[in-house]
Amino acid sequence: MACRISELVLSCRDPELLARFWCEVLDFVVLDREEDGSLEIGPRDGFGGPQPTIILSRNDDPVVGRSRLHIDVNATDRDQDAELERLLALGARRADIGQTCEEPWHVLADPEGNEFCLLRARLDPL
């Protein structure tokens, strides 16, 4: 028996802002709200399916350095260029982490500066 990822936890200053952003990016919905302001977002069919949920945990501590973990996303219904334009319109911004611009992916940051990559391959929707 092996494990699988069921949830990703992302500390953030504004869980509502990031929930709106990531729900649009991933076609997720808010699944749960905690009294401390934390939110759980995930696929419309909820927790436990093939995709992990994301816990947006409120944390006002300053961010120190780059995160050692980031999210990679793939478009499901358009090519990479069209998806890049959609993500930028949603509030993502380009991030420079020393890439050469020859990579087949784009490095972006969400509204709080968390880096993620848009990969070239298009995946089938679940």
Image (tube, rainbow, N blue to C red):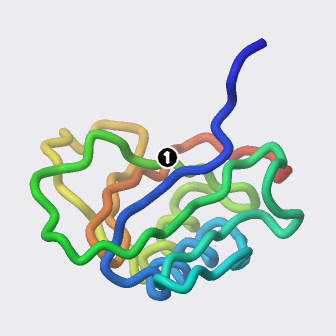
Q: Quadrant of the N terminus?
A: top right
> Residue 99 or 10: which is nearer the viewer?
10
Mark 1 residue type: Asp
Report whether 99 appears left or right of 91.
left
Report whether 36 appears left or right of 40.
left
Q: Quadrant of residue 4?
A: top right
Report whether 34 appears left or right of 116.
right
Residue 9: percent from left, percent from top: 48, 55
35 over 81 or under it: above or below: below
> Residue lying farthest top?
1
> Residue 95 or 30: which is nearer the viewer?
30
* Residue at image coords 75%, 61%: 77
Q: Quadrant of residue 11?
A: bottom left
Report whether 45 appears left or right of 122.
right
Residue 104: percent from left, percent from top: 42, 39
* Residue at image coords 44%, 69%: 57
User: How many numbered tags mark residues here?
Assistant: 1
* Residue at image coords 64%, 37%: 5
Residue 48: percent from left, percent from top: 81, 49
9 over 37 or under it: above or below: above
Disc 1 residue crowd, few under 14, some 14–19, many 20+, Cα 10 Å: some
> Residue 73 or 105: which is nearer the viewer?
73
- Find disc 1 in the rendering and name its residue: 72
Label 1: state its secondary structure: strand
